[in-house]
Image (tube, helix red, strand yellow):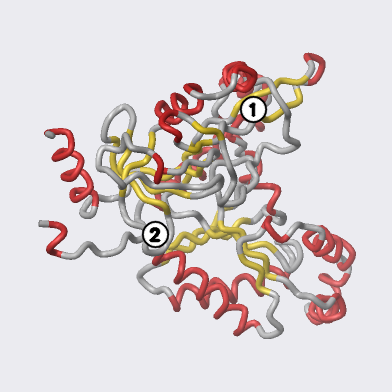
């Protein structure tokens, strides 16, 4: 079939093409049961919260891409339109209404929670297992609450930016000094493969719901200072997206980010790294060693540490809790080396490519 030949050529072509864009999944999809893939057996399965690299849009129903995971090959990924078809075609009537209207059980936060790989999901066309996107509930003030269905995919940077928090608050010498030491280590370790960039703007203002909604922006931009802040934040987010196209590791040194929750509603999908000092006494000694000016702000710094301690483990991608800084540096380097490999498709044998 001509379509099959075109599809095979698209898979081969993708191995020499740059990544066009990346997405994070809000649905689960089992491609092993999808017989309508352009090349039989080449549909890419994924869970909620996975990251996908897209090389090209093959047609209205399929993209060419791969899961960002080591040794995952390039295949065909269902487009949002195809996922919607799969969800609607065989959903029970009650669930069908919920998918169409956005009504249904609400979740407390907009961030989709990772689900188990063996999650049953809904059976779509041809018995394909796929879940409907989560429904979230947003506060609308005096107008009540509004339910909103997430799209199947969120566009994110091609290379997820690394953002470090801890051991306490940014802007104080202990946290700044320790984070800078880790950045210097990574700069040397990954020379030629890493970009370390500073951001002074408050990225926490860059909520996708605000930046992508003109009506919300008009309300917020009545204040000139607020408008300037939003414009600067949007510019910085766009810059991070552009830097990620280089396919290098991106480390963002953020002046204002001290907690993972600050970036949850942005499109940055960062790799959150927690530089942790497990002993409060050790942290106190470090603060005191920086002089009286830092000691005066001891309580504020300890409060920042306490807030990080209350985080759930899954809010971080990496927790650096080693006793020695050198060991913590090796830990994050090992993680980033694995991530580097995960973002590169396995080399295609010459015989297969012909």
| Residue at image point 50% right, 22% down | 88
Q: x%, y% of residue 210? A: 61, 29
Q: Closer to us: mark 2 or mark 1?
A: 2
Residue 171 shown left or right of residue 85 in the figure: right
Give the camera-side residue of 188 and 29: 29
341 shown above or below 60:
below
**Residue corresponding to mark 1:** 224
Q: x%, y% of residue 236? A: 51, 45
Q: Which mark is residue 241?
A: none
Identify the element where label 2 is drawn. Answer: loop
**Which residue, as the protein is rendered here, is positioned at the far top?**
143
Give the camera-side residue of 162 and 252: 162
Q: Quadrant of residue 1?
A: top left
Q: x%, y% of residue 69? A: 43, 59
Give the camera-side residue of 271 and 40: 40
Q: Are marks 2 and 1 in contact (CB under 8 Å)?
A: no
| Residue at image point 64% right, 56% down | 255
Q: Quadrant of residue 103?
A: top right
| Residue at image point 49% right, 59% down | 197
Q: Which mark is residue 343?
A: 2
- Label 2 – label 1 distance at C-alpha: 41 Å
Q: Quadrant of the C terminus?
A: bottom left
**Mark with earlier residue (2, 1):** 1
């Amino acid at each position: 079939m001509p379509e099959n030949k075109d599809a095979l050529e698209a898979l081969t072509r993708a191995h020499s093409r740059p990544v066009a864009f990346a997405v994070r999944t809000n649905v689960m999809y089992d491609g092993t049961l999808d017989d309508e893939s352009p090349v039989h057996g080449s549909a890419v399965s994924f869970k909620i919260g996975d990251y996908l690299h897209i090389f090209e849009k093959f047609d209205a129903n399929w993209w060419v891409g791969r899961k960002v995971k080591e040794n995952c090959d390039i295949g065909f990924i269902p487009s949002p339109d195809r996922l919607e078809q799969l969800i609607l075609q065989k959903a029970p009537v009650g669930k069908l209404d919920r998918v169409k209207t956005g009504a249904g059980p609400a979740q407390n936060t907009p961030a989709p929670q990772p689900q188990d790989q063996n999650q049953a999901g809904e059976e779509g066309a041809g018995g394909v297992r796929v879940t409907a996107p989560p429904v979230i509930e947003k506060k609308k003030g005096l107008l009540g609450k509004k339910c909103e269905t997430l799209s199947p995919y969120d566009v994110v940077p091609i290379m997820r930016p690394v953002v470090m928090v801890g051991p306490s608050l940014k802007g104080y010498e202990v946290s700044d000094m320790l984070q800078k030491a880790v950045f210097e280590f990574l700069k040397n370790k990954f020379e030629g493969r890493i970009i370390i960039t500073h951001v002074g703007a408050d990225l926490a203002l860059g909520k996708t719901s605000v930046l992508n909604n003109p009506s919300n922006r008009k309300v917020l931009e009545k204040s000139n200072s607020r408008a300037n802040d939003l414009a600067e934040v949007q510019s910085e987010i766009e810059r991070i997206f552009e830097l990620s196209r280089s396919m290098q590791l991106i480390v963002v040194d953020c002046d204002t980010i001290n907690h993972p929750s600050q970036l949850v509603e942005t499109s940055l999908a960062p790799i959150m790294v927690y530089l942790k000092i497990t002993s409060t006494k050790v942290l106190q000694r470090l603060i005191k060693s920086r002089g009286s000016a830092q000691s005066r702000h001891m309580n504020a710094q300890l409060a920042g540490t306490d807030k990080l301690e209350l985080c759930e483990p899954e809010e971080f991608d990496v927790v650096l809790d080693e006793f020695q800084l050198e060991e913590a540096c090796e830990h994050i380097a090992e993680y980033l080396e694995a991530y580097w490999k995960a973002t590169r498709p396995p080399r295609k044998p010459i015989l297969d490519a012909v």
